[in-house]
Amino acid sequence: MFRYISVIMIGVYPAAILAPTPVIDWAITIFFPLHSYWGTKEVLSDYLPEIFSTKAVTTTAVYIWTGISVLTFLGLAYLNIYDVGVCKAVAMLWKL
């Protein structure tokens, strides 16, 4: 599933630049946190057990990362619902 989302994101980001629409905003809102969650979770699960000998450290790190990913999704959803949208917000940042 991770690879499918990676392929979808290859098309979503150029579409966000060329034709920012609410559909693209919601695609970024859903796929960006999901992609980063799965990728970072795998990195944490692969490398933390090699550094720390206890499983508790890895489990705690994954729980913290899950919370960060949920907050990322909620923040992007807030931008889409109550503000200008993700694409427009990034465009406004680029204009600074």
Image: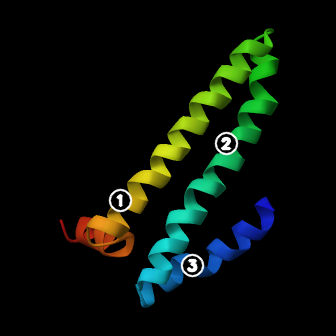
Badge 3 is on which residue?
A: 12
Check disc 1 and give the amino acid type.
Answer: Tyr
Q: Quadrant of residue 63?
A: top right
- Density class for disc 2 (Cα within 10 Å; few <14, some 14-19, many ≥20) is some
The alpha-carbon separation of the residues under discs 3 and 1 comes to 19 Å
State the residue at coordinates (78%, 70%).
Answer: 4
Above/below status of 23 relative to 91: below
Instruction: Kindly report which numbered mark, 3 or 1, lies closer to the viewer in this rendering.
Output: 1
Badge 2 is on which residue?
A: 40
Q: Nearer the viewer, residue 76 or 4?
A: 76
Check disc 3 and give the amino acid type.
Answer: Val
State the residue at coordinates (55%, 73%).
Answer: 27
- Density class for disc 1 (Cα within 10 Å; few <14, some 14-19, many ≥20) is some
Tag 1, which secondary structure?
helix
Tag 3, which secondary structure?
helix
Numbered label attached to residue 45: none
**71 on left or right of 66:** left
Q: Are the residues at dot 3 and dot 1 in contact (C-beta closer than 8 Å)?
A: no
Mark with earlier residue (3, 1): 3
Indicate the position of residue 25 as horizontal and vertical percent values.
Answer: 45, 74
The alpha-carbon separation of the residues under discs 1 and 2 comes to 23 Å
State the residue at coordinates (67%, 30%).
Answer: 62
The alpha-carbon separation of the residues under discs 3 and 2 comes to 20 Å
